[in-house]
Amino acid sequence: MKSAFTKGAVRATAGLALGLTMSWSAAAEPGVGDDTILFGQSAAFEGPAAALGTGMRQGLLAAFAEANAAGGVQGRKLELVSYDDGYEPETAIDNTKKLLEQDKVFALIGEVGTPTSKAVQPIATDAKVPFVGPFTGAGFLRDTSLGNVVNVRGSYDQETEAWIRHLTEDLNYDKIAILYQDDSFGRAGLSGVQKAMQKRGLELVAEGTYKRNTTAVKSALLEIRKADPQAVVMVGAYGPCAEFIRLGKKVGLDATYMNISFVGSKALANELGEDGAGVVITQVVPFPWDSSIPVVADYQKALKAHTPDAEVGFVSLEGYIVGRLAVSALEKVNGEVTRESFLQAVEQTGEFDLGGVTLTYGPDDNQGMDHVFLTEIQADGSFKAINRLAKSGS
């Protein structure tokens, strides 16, 4: 894989880009050359969500490099060009237009975030460009009328249902508050929590919000603290969530803190340090340190081979699974590789067994996985997979 980082972008080297452009000029489909297929990504590589974009990209590149080392797909090597959007919708729109109009990518892959995905998905759909494996569980992307969208992870509704089920059944809690990012991402999580609460005849005791790409959570903390909740469920990125938990513990908010998978688990644990002990995070991929699962063992090997200094984690494992799906779907294409034949391969193949993880698709299902897993940060910053919640100290 030839790639280099330049400010604001992670992209193919100039020499490679020139070669690809020359090859594409004779190709029938954008991004498909005689010996290459180019994917495009817009994600956060700087700012409070940078670890999410970096993790997704590392996983994708590990999967692509693994396939390339084995000869590529039908003789073609997979390449990825990535641009930094800083987790801002307007920048994501600019990046997406550049990827489609200038770089002429075959497909968009590994978009990070709900607000950014909400901004660019219509562009991809209008252009009939595959929009593969976005790092978000937002419900609008599960609309099966969006024939170009291929989700991998479970939905936020599934994660929030798991939160409330475990909090009410394992711990018998009924006083639950929420902190959420004040945008489409946060409101998607809020909606899921409200549905799960209403199903059980409960209402949130408090709500607090913060602005995207900030860590300004003090006002939210004061509002939530007044209600003295037993648990605070959190729909946000690792920076503001870590700040809230740190400050909450400092002012004596003795609650169970639960985070959504998007938070960026390893980054959250690193930010929290010793304050992270007992914090719960729902995950939508298996435990990335469990090498008894074949796809996890493959991921660990591929990540180490491509990026030796990268840390194993949930985000890069998700990126790897997304990359493996793209590779598998391309391998299933019969005849010419086109955007349409790629999408048909996903739907018609139906089931992709990656080794301990199975992704299932169909005419009425564009989401590969439905599982939600519970994990808990330990005192040393590591993670423990758990089956049920327990009160602190028990």
Image (cartoon, grey):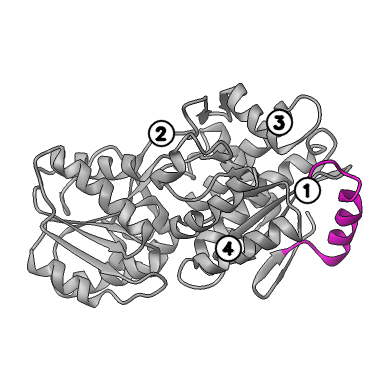
> Amino acid type of disc 4?
Ile
Relative to the observer, which residue lies in front, 32 or 61?
Answer: 32
User: Which residue is tagged 2?
Assistant: 370
> Amino acid type of disc 2?
Asp
Who comes first in sequence, dot 4 or dot 3? 4
User: Which residue is tagged 4?
Assistant: 93
User: Which residue is tagged 1?
Assistant: 31
Who comes first in sequence, dot 3 or dot 1? 1
Asked if labels 1 and 3 touch by Cβ distance under 8 angstroms, the answer is no
> Amino acid type of disc 1?
Gly
Q: From what the image shows, is residue 121 above or below residue 51?
A: above
Q: From what the image shows, is residue 372 above or below residue 126?
A: above
- Asked whether residue 254 is drawn in magenta, I would say no
Question: Is residue 95 visible in this depiction of the protein?
Answer: yes
Q: Measured from the top left, where is residue 305 in percent x and y?
A: 70, 50
For the point 57% across and 26% down, the residue is: 353
Q: Quadrant of residue 171?
A: top left
For the point 64% across and 43% down, the residue is: 128
Q: Measured from the top left, where is residue 316 in percent x and y?
A: 55, 51
For the point 73% across and 51% down, the residue is: 105
Judged by depth in the image, the label closer to the viewer, 4 or 1, is 4
Q: Secondary structure at mark 3?
A: helix
For the point 47% across and 29% down, the residue is: 365
